[in-house]
């Protein structure tokens, strides 16, 4: 089989990470089977289109490294790949269903249908437009041919509805969920073609999948209730249906319900791949500092398990290991801390030079210009402590500027009456060291501490307070070697003066 799969989003807003995962699984499946990955834009619902959303989808997939084989920008033998550019196709297929008695014209107004729904609700029932009621409503099955043709020719708005059979057991299979049986009486006669001349998702989806020779439909579980209709449509057209796989939902961090933008806003994490700049803006993983490889790795494991203990996968390894049969049936709980963990792993794999190049841009935005070799050394000291390059500044700001304040809690706990004298002695020791390297300064200072019989912790904590302003940062001798002898001595003197005034 020549495997052909498609990701078919609607450009109605930013692309949720659940949609990105659907695209990713389709892409992995296609590459694993030497198949074709298609991007089709499903914009048949013109009332919900959002300007910029189509470009956003394309940009998001590109950032993730999900490469499209056929699509609106790549072209291909089965285009156009935007459904609104294919609208002339769908009317013909609606007519085919009507001619076969598999669909019919319906002239009921929205107001009439709303009244029927409300009347049913008052009786504790749910209104379903199906075989039980269709002959009592305003359609080409209940009206005479002369009546409905006159209504149609007069320009009265109408839709085309699928004629769901009465009391039939519909059998179908899903790769993830197994064999499923649904009774047709629980289903309604879905609208296939609207009065605005556009098909609904159901008709356009089936027709396009058939014409584009899609072999596997891999999509979110929210489409599972539509599967019986889609199976019936394939049967009505006399077409062989593709294989289906419905992916589990991405759940909130507490596991209770579908992950939403509101959850991300509340807990401080993105639910979109890249920044959404239109209307109500939303942050993205790219702008938050995630590497695309880390994002994709994290997303792949939300709903799929390779069956091993391995967690870090390159795209090539994901392709090699991926299997639809190993996708879970149940929803996958999103863990924002685990997402950070993945980024941490990828950051550690990068060279100090690569990270330094990224960090240099952050410094330049602050008006700080530093030699790249120095930044490499700095990155090497702190990269184990951070999940994102942007966090390096919070771990290293004192490398670039002398502290203005000194942690009062550290002063209370670590500063005593004889501390200033010890710090002046330490300054003298540092001033007399020829080579100001981490190894030599550490050796000389520790020798001095030992000879004097001082408490190492007391000396080093006070020293750190003067140089850094708080109890944080990497190895002290790495810090002073990086900032240099002159800056170190200046900070000791300044700190003694400021703390002296505080205590006076």
Image (cartoon, helix red, strand yellow):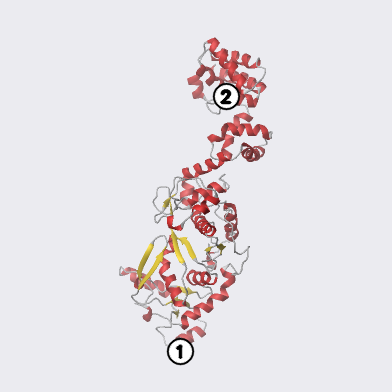
Tag 1, which secondary structure?
helix
Around disc 2, counting alpha carbons within 10 Å, would you say few (fewer than 14), some (14 to 19), or many (20 or more)? some
- Residue 282 appears anywhere in the view: no
From the top left corner, tell me how far across and down residue 17 is, in percent.
50, 53
Tag 2, which secondary structure?
helix
CB-based contact (under 8 Å), mark 1 and mark 2: no
Is 452 in front, or is 270?
Answer: 452
Q: Earlier in the sequence, mark 1 or mark 2?
A: 1
Is 273 in front, or is 62?
Answer: 62
From the top left corner, tell me how far across and down residue 345 is, in percent.
53, 41
**Residue at the disc numbered 1:** 146
Is 61 in front, or is 411?
Answer: 61
Kindly identify the residue that appears in the image at 48 percent across and 48 percent down.
264
Q: In this picture, is 323 found above or below 415?
A: below
Q: How many marks?
A: 2
Q: In this picture, is 321 found above or below 6?
A: above
Q: In the image as oriented, which residue stretches furthest toward the bottom?
A: 146
Q: In the image as oriented, which residue stretches furthest toward the front?
A: 1
Q: In this picture, is 327 found above or below 223?
A: above
- Residue 346 appears anywhere in the view: yes
- Say whether residue 115 is left or right of residue 301: left
Cα distance in 3D space between marks 1 and 2: 93 Å
Quadrant (top left, top right, bottom left, bottom right) of the C terminus: top right
Q: In the image as oriented, which residue stretches furthest toward the top?
A: 452
Is 23 in front, or is 262?
Answer: 23
Q: Residue 378 lies in what quarter of the image?
A: top right
**Residue at the disc numbered 2:** 476
From the top left corner, tell me how far across and down residue 175 is, in percent.
42, 62
Kindly identify the residue that appears in the image at 59 percent across and 13 percent down.
425
- Say whether residue 294 is left or right of residue 361: left
């Amino acid at each position: 089989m020549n495997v052909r799969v498609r990701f078919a989003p609607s450009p109605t807003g930013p692309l949720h990470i659940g949609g990105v995962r659907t695209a990713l699984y389709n892409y992995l499946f296609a590459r694993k089977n030497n198949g074709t990955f298609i991007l089709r834009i499903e914009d048949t619902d013109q009332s919900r289109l959002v300007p910029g959303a189509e470009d956003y989808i394309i940009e998001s997939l590109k950032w993730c490294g999900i490469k499209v084989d056929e699509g609106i920008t790549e072209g291909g033998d089965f285009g156009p790949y935007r459904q609104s550019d294919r609208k002339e196709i769908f009317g013909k297929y609606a007519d085919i269903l009507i001619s076969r008695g598999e669909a019919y014209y319906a002239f009921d107004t929205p107001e009439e249908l709303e009244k029927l729904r409300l009347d049913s609700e008052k009786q504790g029932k749910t209104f379903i437009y199906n075989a039980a009621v269709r002959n009592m409503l305003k359609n080409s099955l209940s009206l005479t041919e002369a009546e409905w043709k006159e209504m149609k020719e007069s320009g009265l708005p109408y839709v085309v509805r699928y004629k769901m059979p009465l009391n039939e057991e519909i059998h179908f299979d899903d790769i993830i969920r197994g064999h499923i049986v649904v009774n047709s009486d629980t289903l309604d006669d879905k609208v296939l073609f609207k009065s605005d001349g556009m098909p609904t998702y159901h008709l356009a989806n089936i027709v396009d999948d058939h014409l584009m020779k899609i072999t596997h439909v891999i999509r979110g579980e929210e489409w599972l209730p539509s599967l019986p209709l889609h199976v019936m449509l394939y049967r009505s057209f006399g077409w062989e249906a593709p294989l289906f796989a419905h992916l589990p939902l991405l759940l909130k961090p507490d596991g209770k319900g579908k992950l939403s933008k509101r959850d991300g806003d509340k807990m401080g994490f993105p639910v979109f791949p890249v920044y959404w700049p239109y209307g109500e803006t939303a942050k993205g993983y790219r702008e938050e500092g995630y590497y695309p490889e880390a994002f994709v790795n994290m997303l792949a494991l939300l709903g799929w398990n390779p069956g091993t203990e391995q967690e870090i996968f390159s795209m090539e390894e994901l392709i090699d290991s991926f299997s639809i049969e190993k996708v879970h049936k149940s929803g996958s709980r999103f863990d924002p801390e685990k997402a950070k963990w993945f980024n941490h792993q990828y950051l550690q794999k990068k060279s100090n030079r690569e990270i330094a190049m990224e960090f240099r841009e952050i410094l330049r935005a602050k008006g700080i210009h530093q030699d790249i070799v120095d930044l490499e050394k700095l990155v090497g000291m702190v990269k184990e402590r951070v999940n994102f390059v942007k966090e390096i500044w919070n771990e290293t700001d004192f490398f670039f500027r002398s502290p203005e304040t000194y942690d009062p809690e550290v002063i209370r706990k670590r500063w005593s009456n004889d501390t200033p004298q010890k710090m002046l002695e330490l300054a003298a020791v540092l001033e007399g060291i020829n080579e100001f390297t981490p190894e030599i300064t550490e050796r000389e200072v520790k020798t001095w501490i030992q000879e004097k019989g001082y408490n190492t912790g007391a000396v080093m904590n006070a020293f750190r307070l003067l140089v850094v302003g708080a109890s944080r940062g990497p190895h002290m001798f790495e810090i002073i070697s990086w900032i240099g002898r002159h800056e170190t001595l200046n900070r000791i003197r300044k700190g003694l003066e400021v703390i002296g005034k505080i205590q006076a």
